[in-house]
Image: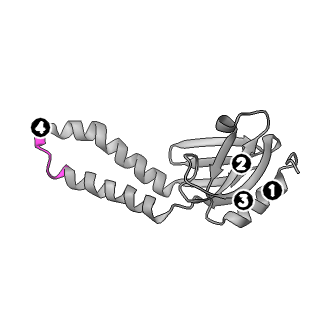
Amino acid sequence: MRDKAKIDLWISVLLWSMNIFYIVLFFVIPLNELWVYAVFIVPVIIMMIWILIGSYYELREDYLYMRIGPFFGRIKYENIKSLTLKNNLLSSMAMSYHRIEIKEHKKSYLRGTTFIGPQNREEFYEELKRLCRNLEK
């Protein structure tokens, strides 16, 4: 099962606004400095667009695969200790306020907690819960 990442409106507006700003900036920069723009700003624009359109979560055979643009992660189902529906803005693999909190066995809170934000959160949560056999009761 694959589900696109949910992106809250404010994050989407922020990223698209920055892209538009950088594109407008292209027409204002002096010609002799365009190489600096090409080297530093074009990769940033590409990465932001990649994050906006290339983010998803996928339930694979043995693990949860998470991709947010160029960043990715994997969590084996057997390592998942607990799943909880949460509403928060802690930094993680989610771009939405409505998230699923995943805690892993034998890891600290910081290293063993991941938040994901699929578009169909409840459906994705139920399917992920079904695949995880080592959940604590």
Where is residue 83? Give x, y as percent: 76, 52
| Sooner in the amino-acid sequence: mark 4 or mark 3 | 3
Q: Tell me which residue sits at (72%, 42%) in the image.
A: 75
Q: Tell me which residue sits at (67%, 63%) in the image.
A: 121
Badges 2 and 4: C-beta atoms under 8 Å apart? no
Q: Is residue 13 visible?
A: yes
Q: In this view, does 96 lie to the left or right of 104?
A: left
Q: What residue type is labelled 2?
A: Ile
Q: Which mark is residue 102?
A: 2
Where is residue 112? Give x, y as percent: 70, 38
> Magenta residues?
26-32
Q: Tell me which residue sits at (78%, 62%) in the image.
A: 126
| Sooner in the amino-acid sequence: mark 2 or mark 4 | 4
Q: Which mark is residue 32?
A: 4
| Sooner in the amino-acid sequence: mark 3 or mark 2 | 3
Residue occupied by mark 1: 129
Residue occupied by mark 3: 1
Q: What residue type is labelled 1?
A: Lys
Please say if 35 is above or below 91. Answer: above
Q: How far is disc 2 from disc 1 in space, using C-alphas?
A: 10 Å
